[in-house]
Image (tube, rainbow, N blue to C red):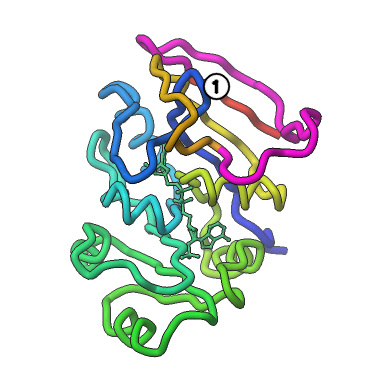
Amino acid sequence: MANSKPKVTLSAAITLDGKIGQKNKQIVLSSKTDKIRVHKLRSKSDAILVGKNTVEQDDPLLTVRYAKGKNPIRIILDSHGTIKNNSKIIKTCKRVPTIIVTSEIISKPNLNRLQKLPIDVIVCGKTQVNITKLLSILSKKGIKTVLLEGGGTLNRSFLKKNLIDEMIIALTPYVLGSKNTVSLFEGMSFPELKTKLPLKLKNVQKSGNEIILNYKI
Ligand SMILES: NC(=O)c1ccc[n+]([C@@H]2O[C@H](COP(=O)([O-])OP(=O)(O)OC[C@H]3O[C@@H](n4cnc5c(N)ncnc54)[C@H](OP(=O)(O)O)[C@@H]3O)[C@@H](O)[C@H]2O)c1
């Protein structure tokens, strides 16, 4: 019987104080060596998944460029379907397979605009994307591995629903502080410290000034 959900691997670069970014400002935490590692990881994944804010703020390509290999399918979670036509994702969607996932809250004009593009549009969820349902849809499409590349709000949703099978975290030699920053898992503080991950630390690797932490079930 086919697996009902693809394997989800969360990949992120964090500062020493657990931040992944700054609000409304693009920053680069990864070294060139680390970018090569992440791009190799991308090339081995069927799909790469990010939240709308990451696309709005960083305007990423989400392709494999620092390593050899195929591009994964890019999946953007955008409940209102407001991704800009001049974003790098949309500008490259003819050559890189792309899925935009929206919810039933999307307006007709936004849905029409997206449906005219050479992308796959999935409507899944009432006011926000239902990630459990989405993973089941992706599984039916033959997607077996998903690289979850943030940001913090989306990571939190996956953590909350216990959908993360593996985490590969690059600990970088920076600090960002708490004001206007984005945490690895954004949102309300967890009620208790014992909100521990159902994952175990399996490997630690030093790479230049970075430490790669690998947690698995
Ligand atoms: N260091 C790293 O490795 C790394 C990687 C990626 C991003 N980042 C940083 O992370 C920051 C962005 O993170 P963010 O937390 O602001 O936003 P995000 O996680 O990128 O995007 C969140 C948005 O995705 C949409 N979404 C749709 N369905 C969702 C669901 N079920 N659960 C959660 N979100 C859903 C929501 O917008 P709608 O309701 O409009 O759909 C939500 O506001 C940026 O600073 C970026 O640079 C860092």
Q: Count the marks: how many?
A: 1
Pick whichever, 23 or 203, lies toward us. Answer: 23
Q: Which residues are magenta?
A: 185-211
For label 1, count other residues whose C-alpha is less than 10 Å away and answer few (under 14), some (14-19) or many (20+): some
| 206 drawn magenta | yes
Q: Is residue 188 left or right of residue 150?
A: right
Quadrant of the image occupied by residue 98: bottom left
Q: Position of residue 4 (x, y in %)?
A: 68, 62
Q: Position of residue 59 (x, y in %)?
A: 27, 51
Pick whichever, 200 or 182, lies toward us. Answer: 182
| 86 drawn magenta | no
- Predominant SS along the magenta part: loop
Quadrant of the image occupied by residue 97: bottom left
Quadrant of the image occupied by residue 20: top left
Identify whether 39 is placed above or below 110. Answer: above
Q: Position of residue 86 (x, y in %)?
A: 18, 65
Q: Which residue is mark 1?
A: 213
Pick whichever, 201 or 16, lies toward us. Answer: 16
Residue at image coords 39%, 74%: 120
Residue at image coords 51%, 59%: 143
